[in-house]
Image (cartoon, rainbow, N blue to C red):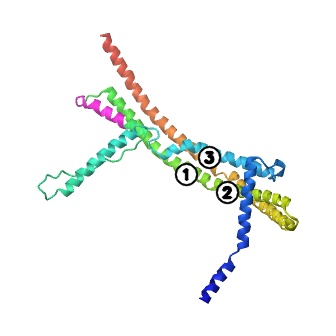
Amino acid sequence: MEGWTKNIQSSFSSIDFTGSANRLSKSFNSSVQATKERLGTVAPEELTELPQEYKDLEARVDALRAAHISLLKIATVYETESYDYPVAIQESISELSTSIGYGITNFASTNLKGTNLPAPAPVTLPAQQHKTLPHALGRSATSAATAIQATHTAGAEDKLGKALGLYAEGWEKIASARVHHDTVVREKFLHPWQSTLSTSINVALKARQAVRVSRLELDAAKQALKNASPARQEQARLEVENSEDTLVQQTELAITAMKSILENPESIKNLNELAKAQLLYFSAAAESLSAVQGEIEELSVAADGEYRKSRDH
């Protein structure tokens, strides 16, 4: 029992109650100081002025953060394949129903074997389709071309059916370019851009928060010194000096962190990747449509000529 008591006493003696009390006191005084400033009961001249360089860097980091947030609000649509194809919701519901139907059929096919009930033949679920506008246009044009050509006799060709087939081919190429575009945008722009916001910029913001806390502690210490009793004057003066040293150190660290993110070229490199991916995609789309549009125009002119000729007779 005596040994246990000694261990407890030893454990308590190792705890720095004085340090803990000082930290709690500092935290409380800082909170009081922050409340006074928020309520406007502290004169502006009583607030410690931070270096102009620090304030200028703060403004620039705030602008950088706002730029990242602003672009991400829009560009995050590239995370979802169907961003330009709202009909995808209806198609997904239809596919879900189909998938459930396939599941039930295959379950019955497997589990009804050896019973008196007829077992349906197992079926294969259709391949998943891309939910983008280019893919949808290509599919719909292909279906339309097939439907029209099916009504013609063997060897005969319908100009609209052929034009629809050409249009479908053009959009199939664009659809492939679209998938590649979205992958590049996500990997080389979105993810790095989001990472910069959540890591590097966040580090700078945390460093600034440490400066704010240190500045509040210093101003609270100055107030404590002003109101300290003669017996507390020396201790209060030391606390002010220590708080000043801490603020200087935290300010230097924050300046370094803010300069680091502002000087880093990563953000503009990421933006260049976005612009480059979009340029390549739209160039591929223009090239594909330009190729098929010429042929469709020839069919259009021929069909118009035949129509006019038939009306003249």
Q: Which residue is drawn at 34% across and 35% down?
A: 142
* Mark 3 crowd level (few <14, some 14–19, many ≥20, 10 Å Cα): some
**Looking at the image, do the residues carrying marks 3 and 2 touch, with CB atoms under 8 Å apart?**
no
Kindly tell me whether residue 295 is visible in this rendering.
Answer: yes
> Residue 179's spot in the image, x, y percent?
45, 45
The kind of residue tagged 1 is: His
Q: Residue lying furthest bottom in this view?
A: 2
User: What secondary structure is marked by label 3?
Assistant: helix
Foreground pick, 140 / 304? 140
> Residue 186's spot in the image, x, y percent?
52, 49
Say which mark, if any, is on residue 257.
none
Q: Distance between the residues labelled 3 and 1?
A: 12 Å
Q: Residue lying furthest right in this view?
A: 230
Question: Which residue corresponds to mark 2?
Answer: 206
Q: What stretch is highlighted in magenta?
A: 139-154
Left-right relation of 58 to 78:
right
User: What secondary structure is marked by label 1?
Assistant: helix
User: What secondary structure is marked by label 2?
Assistant: helix
Say which mark, if any, is on residue 191.
1
Question: Which residue corresponds to mark 3?
Answer: 68
